[in-house]
Image: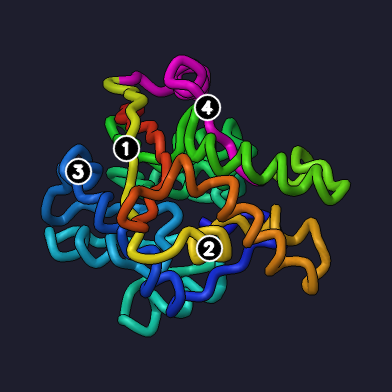
Amino acid sequence: MAGPPSQRWDPARYARNARFVSELGAPVVDLLDPQPGERLLDLGCGDGALTRELMARGCRVLGIDSSPEQVAAARRQGLDARVGDAAELAFDGEFDAVFSNAALHWVRRADEAIAGVHAALVPGGRFVGEFGGAGNVSAIREALTVALAERGVDAAPLDPWFFPTDDEYRARLQAGGFQVREVRLFARPTPLPGDVAEWLEIFAQPFLGGVADAQRGALIDRLRELLRPRLCDAGGRWAVDYVRLRFAADKP
């Protein structure tokens, strides 16, 4: 799910360098346990990789994403996808389940998103997902704070992410009318297919946008320098310090 206006998605680049995001979503699909004939909403569908998986299990799926580029990529594969904001859903009892993978950490209006999901579900419907939780990419956030401060830029106003604790998100779900079955926070260090610079250029655009285009290369070089001792092994292989929050909740 795309973030603020300064975060844009290139589907081809994403497919080359970030396909691990949807591949690591398989356990969340299993937690959802989609049944043939169910009507599902894939919230933050991206280019539709997991939308296709849900359809392969016999479900009727609508994908929603705030990135026009990703929605266009999903539609080119014949998927039912549309541009939409997770915090401004306007469905009323239309879905048996709402599924979301690696998207809700871009949605700072979390309570509004939860309310929209609740309204979109039929009674007994379920809300299942996974996204970045407290501590997610902490090394990267710290490096961004340092490198931007060196250039006289405060990173805090540029931060697009929402990384709650498990207790916080459980409370938000319950306040939104859900019965919570599971909320779990866990570390998942994730190897990258290439250099961390590609990750930064895909996922950290709001921070990189804090400097002029001419300074961006130098900023990324500095970030690599700061991150190498923590995220790069002796063989030159990079990983990202992901912490994920996985949840399942039901609408009474």
Disc 1/disc 3 C-alpha distance (Å): 13 Å
Classify mark 4: helix, strand or loop: loop
In depth, the one of 229 and 103 nearer the eye is: 229
Of labels 1 and 3, earlier in sequence is 3
Q: Position of residue 104 (x, y in %)?
A: 49, 43
Residue that badge 3 annotates: 27
Q: Nearer the viewer, residue 115 or 141?
A: 141
Q: Which residue is mark 4?
A: 164
| Distance in Å between CA atoms under marks 3 and 4 | 20 Å
Residue 67 x %, y %: 56, 67
Does the magenta-highlighted stretch encompass residue 164?
yes
Q: Which residue is mark 1?
A: 188
Q: Are marks 1 and 3 in contact (CB under 8 Å)?
A: no
Q: Amino acid at mark 4?
A: Pro
Distance between mark 1 and mark 4 Cα atoms:
16 Å
Three-letter code, disc 3: Pro
Residue 197 numbered mark, or none: 2
Mark toward the viewer: 2 or 3: 2
